[in-house]
Amino acid sequence: MKWVYIAAGIALFIKMLLIPNPALNLSDNSIVELVVRDSGVPNAVSGIIFRNRLYDTIFEVVVFTISILGAYFLLANEKPSTKIYQFTDQPSIVLARLGATIAALVSIELAIRGHLSPGGGFAAGVAGGTAIGLVAITSPSEWMQALYKRWHFATWEKVSILIFIGLAVITLSGLELPHGELGALVSGGVIPILNILVAAKVALGSWAVILLFIRYRGLL
């Protein structure tokens, strides 16, 4: 029997060497144009992530949530750090907060215009998390924790993922909002909303993880 498998493997190897793969009769931009037309957004990447492969995106968001819960679980039995070192010199503080401001503005831009240009919800969330991290290295951790709890950002994070999953299920069932005019800010149906929800989820989740690691592992 093993000789049958060996012969089949040799035949497959010869086939790969001698028989070329059939080439599709498509122009270079036809697939991109098809995605843009079906999704109603100029950014084909956002069209694929939030429409053509929305199943994958749902589980990516869920995996991010599970990773945050895992961080809470793994650090639950550890003792908080007794002393947290942070930047105290004025030049570093000014530069870090300037960088945080720029990162926050980039995050907003990527979230609301990610369906029109390169960017999107995940990139916006990373930029927002970067802004939060830069503020965290120059601000008291108690103040960051109090701000996080005062505005109930943990609740907003959970609400954002629930709304995202709900809208994704509705979209996958075949119900879509009107696409609007291609290239307009309000266009693409539900894709801009999903972009904003993912950005909020990633940024707020990053805030939670940053506070958690600062509390139990220190900053520097």
Image (cartoon, helix red, strand yellow):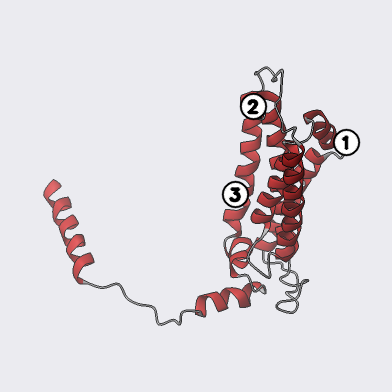
Q: Looking at numbered disc 3 in the image, what kind of residue is underneath it?
A: Glu
Front of the two marks 1 and 2: 1
Of the image marks 2 and 3, the number of the one nearer the N terminus: 3
**Mark 1 crowd level (few <14, some 14–19, many ≥20, 10 Å Cα):** few
Q: Can residue 1 be seen in this snapshot?
A: no
Q: Which quarter of the figure has residue 120?
A: bottom right
Relative side of 199 to 142, left or right: left
- Compute the Cα span from label 2 to label 3: 20 Å
Query: Pointer 3: what residue?
Result: 60
Of the image marks 1 and 3, the number of the one nearer the N terminus: 3
Q: Is mark 3 on a helix, strand or loop?
A: helix
Residue at point 73% right, 69% down? 189
Q: Which quarter of the figure has residue 42?
A: bottom right
- Compute the Cα span from label 1 to label 3: 28 Å
Q: Which quarter of the figure has residue 43?
A: bottom right
Q: Looking at numbered disc 1 in the image, what kind of residue is underneath it?
A: Arg
Query: Pointer 2: what residue?
Result: 73
**Mark 2 crowd level (few <14, some 14–19, many ≥20, 10 Å Cα):** few
Most foreground residue, 45 or 142? 142
Position of 180 relative to 56 (above/below): below
Relative side of 79 to 56, left or right: right
- Compute the Cα span from label 1 to label 2: 23 Å
Residue at point 73% right, 64% down? 192
Of the image marks 1 and 2, the number of the one nearer the N terminus: 2
Residue at point 17% right, 64% down? 14
Residue that extends furthest to the right in the rendered view of this protein: 150
Position of 21 relative to 220 (above/below): below
Query: Pointer 1: what residue?
Result: 150
Relative side of 21 to 129, left or right: left
